[in-house]
Image (tube, rainbow, N blue to C red):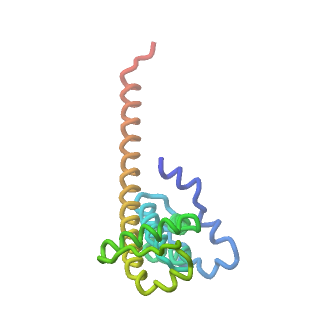
Amino acid sequence: MPRKFFRKWAPSKDTVLAPAFMRPFAKWLAHPNLWHMNRRSVSGGVAIGLFIAFLPIPFQMLLAAITAVFFRVNVALAVAMPLLSNPFTMVPILWSAYIIGAWLTGGTVALPTSGITFEWVLAQLHVLWLPLLVGLLILATLSAVLGYLIIQFLWRLNVILHKRRKQKQRANGINQTPS
């Protein structure tokens, strides 16, 4: 079941609220839906975390936690999803966002002949910022929507398969006669 998978990796409410520095936040973090592993809470947490993962801002995990508390979705998953944008994945994310943004804004993909350097990026920032921002917002929205829909679909599929297995077990149990 998806619930067992997510529960295995997610911290419990008691674990998060145990440190003394977390006690002032207990009244906001005490809502049960923030820690429940149900389809709505898990898919919402994944969507929020994925959206924030594509935003080029500091403190992504903190923003994900605050947003998850506001929308009352799973905090642990919302905080974990921004880890997808890390130093290894940022270059492909930024590059694909720039390409998508340049295509949507009608700009051209401008590359230096001698390679991309930090100085070149700073010098070209006035040209790069709009396509990059548009591309990042598109990627953030698409990843959030796809993450939400995929979790919803997989969760529902798992429930259907579980019900079919139970029905098959019941049917086999009823049709078999003791010898």
Q: Note whether residue 66 is visible.
A: yes
Location of the C terminus by quadrant is: top left
Q: Is residue 98 above or below residue 147?
A: below
Q: Residue furthest top?
A: 179
Q: Residue furthest right?
A: 20
Which residue is depicted at the point 57% across and 67% down?
86
Image quarter of residue 79: bottom right
Please state the horizontal and vertical placement of residue 7, each as a whole percent of the image: 55, 55
Please state the horizontal and vertical placement of residue 64, each as a whole percent of the image: 50, 74
Q: Is residue 84 left or right of residue 98?
A: right
Image quarter of residue 16: bottom right
Number of marks drawn: 0
Please state the horizontal and vertical placement of residue 39, each as a whole percent of the image: 41, 58
The answer to which of 116 and 177 lies nearer the viewer is 116
Which residue is depicted at the point 53% across and 50% down?
4
The answer to which of 151 and 73 lies nearer the viewer is 151
Q: Note whether residue 75 is visible.
A: no
The answer to which of 65 and 87 lies nearer the viewer is 87
Q: Is residue 151 left or right of residue 26?
A: left
The answer to which of 112 and 168 lies nearer the viewer is 112
Which residue is depicted at the point 53% across and 72% down?
115
Q: Is residue 175 left or right of residue 55?
A: left
Which residue is depicted at the point 59% across and 56% down?
9
Q: Is residue 54 above or below residue 128?
A: above
Please state the horizontal and vertical placement of residue 167, each as a whole percent of the image: 36, 34
Q: Is residue 36 above or below residue 116?
A: above
